[in-house]
Amino acid sequence: MFTVDLFLNEGGFFGDNQQVTAIHQQLDKEYRETETIRFVTYKDNDATTPQQLSDNFETSDDQEHIFILSGSHGFEFIQKNPKVQAIIGQKKPIVIWFGHQDPVDLVSLEKHLNIVALPKYIFTIRPELKSLFAGRYIEMQSVPNTLTEEALSTAKKTWDSAYPQEAIRPASNSCSYMGVFLGGDAPKRDKTHLYWDEKEAYEQGLAFGAIAQKEKKHLLITNGPRTGKFDPQSPDPKNPVVRAPHTESSPLDPVSVAFLTGLKKSGIPDTQYQFFDFKFGKPPKSAYKAIIAALRETPNSVAVYSGESISYAEIAYFIPQTYAFLTSSMHDEHHEALQQFETLGLIRILNFEKPLSTQLIDILKQQVARRAGANDIDNIIRRLNALKKPDNTSQKGFMPLLETVQQNALPKPDVLPDSQHVQVTPKTLSPSAQPVGMK
């Protein structure tokens, strides 16, 4: 038996949580028939989390622990908590950390991290990380996928039943759907923020209204927890003022208002679009999966997402024609990510000036890209298996001591030529990552 400790971010950083969820799902699938696994979840906004972690390790001292964290919040949970560092040093769990971007001080946790997973382009920009984490790093080719066939098969029905006044309407006037997934303000490596403001949102509302009418698309639009979240005029750029908390009682955020104003200005009929406002709650009110389900059910539908939301690229695992649109809240690493995904064939960057028929995605190439995404998670599972000791030894099931890992010459990182990198056997390709229609 072993315990998997999951560290989740509660501040609306769903992309970070999706990485934790993706490895959680794959670990469960990999070991459920051969191991007894206990999953324990911790939250970053709970001041008692370090003590909870300590207590859990004490009460399960005979078990191996895999501690999974992601993003800057997961990174800082270790970096800023001497107690957590002491727990890791004493109990020797296998610590897996994912990131969409490289924290400034990643090197400071070098001795605490057993597996580091970052996008491929970051290792290109910072090759010294390969040396620092030799034998421990994973180059992420794509983005972890948390969507499943099972969840999507009921998502639309569940949404329509829970919110009948906001049920997804049939596409109007012989249209197919265009799902529009809005992002928002985004942090940079130096902890300052870039903003998606009202002026830009208004202009993009106009653009989406125009393309929907030209292409005969019924728009299904949703915002997210970062849409309009911060005040761009905040005096401290590292601690901007929250103006849109997206709570059940808060009004629609000003950026979404500006987007919808531009949309109406485009002349699009009210019957040709729907807008779904994200709200935090238990559970959160999110039309994300329901919209994706509606797109899947309607031929010729497309998805367009805000480029600063790297996790939204997972939509392409289920919607073949998936595009990203550019925003001013994108920093250099967001642009690098989109370039990587586009080169891989997973998505395309939308050009509003050109017909969609001239921007179609190569489906065969996209199938390979989807397999690359599955391979990212499989690489981490293989790395965990490489840490496993034979059953006939007196050691515990996993061997998390970093010194032992290095002495036993852990296999080199799974960095293969482009022509080989995505060779994944059907056994390791998770159903949720398979191309649409592939059984």
Image: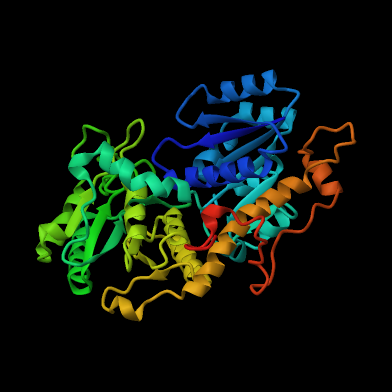
Q: Is residue 233 above or below residue 211?
A: above
Residue 3: x, y in percent? 66, 31
**Would you say 304 lies left or right of 139 here?**
left
Number of numbered discs visible in the structure rendering: 0
Q: Would you say residue 147 is visible in this rendering?
A: no
- Classify residue 219 by image quadrant: bottom left
- Give the residue drawn at x 32%, y 55%: 294
- Give the residue drawn at x 22%, y 66%: 175
Residue 309: x, y in percent? 40, 55
Q: Nearer the viewer, residue 244 or 266?
A: 266
Q: Is residue 131 above or below residue 115?
A: below
Q: Nearer the viewer, residue 115 or 234?
A: 115
- Classify residue 425 by image quadrant: bottom right
Residue 339: x, y in percent? 47, 69
- Give the residue drawn at x 83%, y 42%: 404
Q: Which residue of the protein is positioned furthest toward the front in this rendering?
A: 439
Residue 129: x, y in percent? 66, 57
**Would you say 312 lies left or right of 69 here?**
left
Q: Would you say residue 170 is visible in this rendering?
A: yes
- Give the residue drawn at x 37%, y 40%: 239
Q: In the rendered view of the protein, which quadrant contains the N terminus?
A: top right
Q: Nearer the viewer, residue 418 or 231?
A: 418
Q: In the rendered view of the protein, which quadrant contains the C terminus?
A: bottom right
- Classify residue 359 by image quadrant: bottom left
**Would you say 243 lies left or right of 62 here?**
left
Colour scheme of this structure image? rainbow
Q: Is residue 39 above or below residue 98?
A: above
